[in-house]
Image (spheres, rainbow, N blue to C red):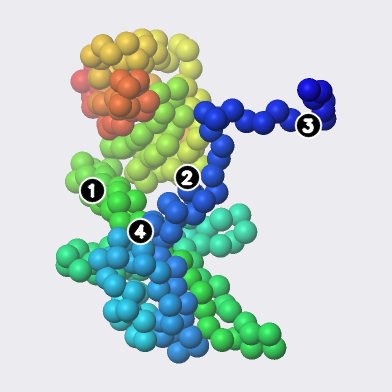
Amino acid sequence: MSLNKNQPPAPSENTTQPSLTNWVEVWSEEFVFYHLDTEGIFTFVSNSVKEVLGLEPEDMVGRNASEFFYSNHPLQNLLKDLADQRATSAGLQPRICTATRTSGETAYLGIREKTVHDAEDVVVGRSGMAYDMTEHVAAELLLHESEQKYRRLVEGLGGDNIIFTRTASGEITYLSPSVKNVLGYASEEVLGMNWRDFTRDYFIGRAEAELSNARIAQGLDHHKIIIEISHAKGGTRLFEVQQHPIFNDQGTYVSMEGIAKDITQSTRTSQ
């Protein structure tokens, strides 16, 4: 039997082919699809609402969406900020609202909708898709609470302290606003810069800081240093730094968080 060289060989029985059907099945379970009329009344709700909220589609059809998707949550402003952060390059963004599961638990839903027109281009309603963002939003709210605690901590520690986070390689990812008073820099202008940009090789503590970073990457305990840092208006300040390394699930050193206290004046006084 001759073979056509331009015809690809038939796949073997154990060849794995991507299946759009499988993806559609997964999406249909994880996303709630629905239609609303011009008054906001559900005219269709997919069966997946049973998995997401524990409701039956017939419990929702014929009723207003506002009875199930709430936009007056006390944290609505924060939820809107989270939605804005997830806007796509096309300008699309989910509306995050809350809903109540039949278990009584609160669910956070990301909702995307589009207007539906008839053949004469008259608006006849909206079609939408809702998906469960509860775990993600809960993590974001926890981070927000943590940042609030950071700010309160800085206020409680006094104006000569700076709270920071940075990557393992040294790029600054967070600086408390107190850095403006202590070093003359606005926190947003130094984000993404490396901490080494604010020291020199001959500065007090620079070599020790490099050694500390290397020891931490090796899993060794070395979390306190004294280091000299450049001030925005010239000159330097001396800091006592207490820091704590963060490791990922594989045990790799990925970031550092800590508090730097300006000890310049107290050091000069004691000399």
In this orientation, does residue 262 appear? no
The location of residue 236, given as percent across then percent down, is: 42, 26
Residue 41, compared with residue 239, is above or below; it is below
Q: In this view of the protein, which residue sits in the foreground, 1 or 165?
A: 1
Q: Which residue is mark 2?
A: 188
Residue type pointed to by label 2:
Glu
Q: Which residue is mark 3?
A: 7
Task: Pick whichever of labels 1 and 3 is earlier in the sequence.
Answer: 3
- Which residue is located at x 48 percent, y 48 percent? 22
Task: Pick whichever of labels 2 and 1 is earlier in the sequence.
Answer: 1
Q: Which residue is mark 1?
A: 149
Residue type pointed to by label 4:
Asp
Q: In this view of the protein, which residue sits in the foreground, 80 or 44?
A: 44
Q: Seen in the image, is 62 located left or right of residue 124?
A: left
SS type, badge 3:
loop
Q: Which residue is mark 4?
A: 132
Q: Quadrant of residue 42?
A: bottom left
* Mark in front: 4 vs 3: 3
Task: Pick whichever of labels 4 and 3 is earlier in the sequence.
Answer: 3
Task: Pick whichever of labels 3 and 2 is earlier in the sequence.
Answer: 3
* Mark in front: 1 vs 3: 3
Separation of disc 1 and disc 3 at Cα?
A: 65 Å
- Which residue is located at x 51 percent, y 62 percent? 93
SS type, badge 4:
strand
The location of residue 252, given as percent across then percent down, is: 35, 20
Separation of disc 2 and disc 4 at Cα?
A: 33 Å
Q: Quadrant of residue 41?
A: bottom left
SS type, badge 1:
helix
Contact between marks 2 and 1 (CB within 8 A): the answer is: no
Residue type pointed to by label 1:
Lys
